[in-house]
Amino acid sequence: MLAMNYRGPKRVRIDNKQLPEILHPQDAIVRVTRSCICGSDLHLYNGSVPDTRVGMTFGHEFTGVVEQIGSQVQKIKVGDKVLVPFNIACGKCVFCQQELYGNCHESNPEATAVGGIYGYSHTAGGYNGGQAEYVRVPYADVGPSVIPDWMHPDDAVLMTDVVPTGYQAAEMGGIRKGDTVVVFGAGPIGIMAARCAWLFGARRVIVIDYVDYRLDFARKYAPCEAYDFRSLEDPVVFIKRTTDWMGADVCIDAVGAEAAGSALQTLLGRKLLLQGGSATALHWAINAVKKGGIVSIVGVYGPIDTLIPIGNVVSKGLTLRGNQASVKRLLPRLIEHVRTGVLNPKALITHHVPLEEVSDAYRIFSDKLDGCIKTVLIPPSSRN
Amino acid sequence: MAQPKIDPTQVPGWGVDADPKNDPTYPMKRRNDGEHAGYSWDRPTQQPATVEILHSNERPNLSAVFGTASPPVALSGMIRRLAFKYSESSYAHWLPLMLADRINEVEGVVHDLSQGRVPNFFAERGGKAQWKHSPDRMLGRLLIGAFVVSAAVGYFTAPKSEEDLDQMEDDSSRSVTSRCPRNVHHAVAHFQE
């Protein structure tokens, strides 16, 4: 089968790889119909996630058709069209039982801090991902959801990560009616977080980034105010000033390890890889939120230490909340939002690219070329 | 500078999920305190380990399922095995893994060559897309790269100046000072006079 093949930082290609096999009685094999490139894939692409081994296939946002099921699978059947949450969850451990499906204890032997994630290095379990024609799906009775007949395939694939992560970013902010919410990052997750902040009753939503076309997109899609931090003398001072010197009620870090805006953070986190990423957005979030406010973190960082002003967290009495989105928990509500038209995920997709052109697709997404917001890879069997 | 304010009530879905109970810790999880019973739940069937799987020393076993994407190999594999002797809380775990990743990249190139395949770095790095959509940036990167390489080659291969060559000749005739720093050399020469 055709599959993306990681060869080293900024080097990926399409190769013929062996078909995946059933390795566990609760496995399914899914023929991929769509898979996305996620902003967090760029951390792998740039070589900043430890234990990202050559030969891996990335891709944790995908939909497909069930081709084969293991002997213990009962809830899905061959031929079902499914969307597959990016987290691999057993449904039985105490964390899954508490609906913390992003923190499963039976899906990743290689690190206890993170549950299993498709195509996200051996630090997240060593699973090949969905940027391929076929993929192995463990715990097939727990994760995959049958796609409703009425749902557009492009909406479905964004329900595997982008929509739940953006929604949970807003949810973790504990937004109250009347709150001012600042979202750092105008990538797909940040834009979705801004959109969802309204659902929780925000009075004002502001997005901060530096990529003009993405700021324009956020203004129209969310809708929201959106500012280029390069045009602000200091984004923290700007947010203080525009909130009558109080600070935002809620700040959301939707950037993570690849943040621009600070030479020191860029040097330590992106060039020298001496910390778990460039934490510029998180630094600003902590300093721009009000005293007693909440900082919600969905931006992905590496596992090693990262430079943030933790003293200010204490002194300001902040609450930091972060997690991998619990996709399975959120799906029923989010599917309803798509059905009623409250959310329109597919509008985020700017590029449909043949799977065979995965190298170029990564470059376009990574370098923010051609007005790219969100890229979907389409395998040959799904293009007709 | 300031942009017009948006009337929230005109945004589709405004407030539909507002939940006054959404204080920190709710609804992130449906608390049942199951952790208090320890690692005692009815575990899923264990996946057999058909390839080498490294596991964190912060857990006693392999998780019930796991990926088998790229088992540890060669020198990078040896380093990874060493790294897994240390906990996720230790730099001795993560930094060797980063080193192993870089070595693994070289191993990948060697493996390609051993299979009779020359890696197409231009294509793998998405060069076609970059050239199509951002030729200026690509040329800039090429120029910077060429400058750095030229500077490095020039630094290491350029002939010494005439003065330095004379100095080296003098140094070679005075073996006692031949490896001394320049200022020490002068001091010794003065003493000899």
Image: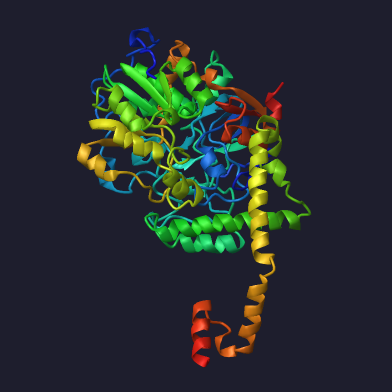
Please provide percent x and percent y for residue A168.
Answer: 38, 28
Residue at (38%, 50%) from the top-left corner?
Answer: A305
- Tell me which residue sits at (67%, 45%) in the image: B143
Is residue A286 visible in the rendered image? The answer is yes
Residue appearing at x 64%, y 59% in the figure: B152
Q: In the depicted view, which residue is nearer to us: B158 or A287?
A: B158
Q: Would you identify the image quadrant in which residue A293 lies?
A: top left
Q: Is A313 in front, or is A26?
A: A313
The residue furthest right is B116
B85 is higher (above) or lower (below) than B164: above
Extreme-front residue of the structure:
B193
Q: Position of residue A309 (x, y in %)?
A: 30, 44
Image spot of residue A56 (x, y percent): 60, 46
| Observer-nearest of A316 and A343 | A316
Q: Is residue A295 left or right of residue A1?
A: left
Asked if residue A338 is positioned above or below residue A316 in the image, the reply reads above
- Residue at the top extreme, as displayed: B10
Q: Is residue A277 visible?
A: no
Q: Quadrant of residue A286?
A: top left
Task: Tell whether B154 sits left or right of A200.
Answer: right
Direction from residue B92 to residue A177 in the image, left or right: left
Residue A335: x, y in percent?
45, 18
